[in-house]
Amino acid sequence: MPEITVLMSVFNGEKWLNNSIDSVLSQSECEFEFIIINDGSTDNTSSIIRSYNDDRIIIIEQGNIGLTKSLNVGLRIAKGKYIARIDADDISMPNRLVEQKKFMEVNTDIALVGSDAILIDENDQYMGHAVYPTSHKMLIKRLKLPLYSVFPHSSIFFQRDVIMKLNGYNENFIMSQDQDLYLRLLSE
């Protein structure tokens, strides 16, 4: 059983999907399962996902229920101790899974980590670097500010069992489900 589950939900993501899937499959950490939920896409998303022949990929085809509910579907079937989130329009650096897993194994009291982000445009041209807080104290301070992101949702890596004790993502949130998750995690 793999220790890591990479979790993606996609709705009409054909434009960026190949790059995102490729970035996961080319990770330096090879042992993981990759759950891709096609959330009722009407474009070529399904055929793109099915074009991959990799035993690590688990494909879930469903009607459109939205990101939050889809992520909970994935959390329920995930076998990994850790969950690494990725969105269909994001790319993971090659050592992401190795680095985040190593950090979590050294810091067993931490339930969730995220990262900075390199911003690129639709032509893969560098636009900037988004830097996020690295200390617990600064993360809490930033979480309490309205309209501030703690770190990109698709950069988080967390202990599945801790998040499942919180009943996963709050399905009342169509957007900002990540911020809600972080706030609920703080109260634990």
Image (cartoon, rainbow, N blue to C red):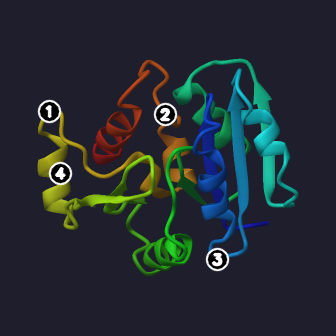
Q: Identify the secondary structure beneath mark 3.
A: loop
Give above or below for 45 relative to 128: above
Q: Quadrant of residue 177?
A: top left
Q: Is residue 58 left or right of residue 28?
A: right
Q: Are marks 1 and 4 in contact (CB under 8 Å)?
A: no
Q: Which residue bears the numbered disc 2?
A: 169
Q: Are marks 1 and 2 in contact (CB under 8 Å)?
A: no
What x and y, as percent, mark residue 186?
28, 47
Distance of label 1 from label 4 (alpha carbons): 12 Å
Q: Is residue 79 visible in the rendered structure shown here?
A: no
Mark 1 or mark 4, which is nearer to you? 1
Q: Which residue type does callout 2 highlight?
A: Tyr
Residue 146 disc label: 1
Residue 90 disc label: none
Q: Residue at x 84, y 60 (%)?
A: 54
What x and y, as percent, mark residue 66?
57, 22
Distance of label 3 from label 1 (alpha carbons): 36 Å
Q: Which residue bears the numbered disc 3?
A: 29
Q: Identify the secondary structure beneath mark 2.
A: loop
Q: Quadrant of residue 180?
A: top left
| Quarter that holds the N terminus | bottom right
Q: Which residue bears the numbered disc 4?
A: 140
Q: Which residue type does callout 4 highlight?
A: Ile
Mark with earlier residue (2, 3): 3
Distance of label 4 from label 3 (alpha carbons): 30 Å
Q: Which residue type does callout 3 highlight?
A: Glu
Give above or below for 164 relative to 85: above
Mark with earlier residue (4, 3): 3
Q: Are marks 2 and 3 in contact (CB under 8 Å)?
A: no
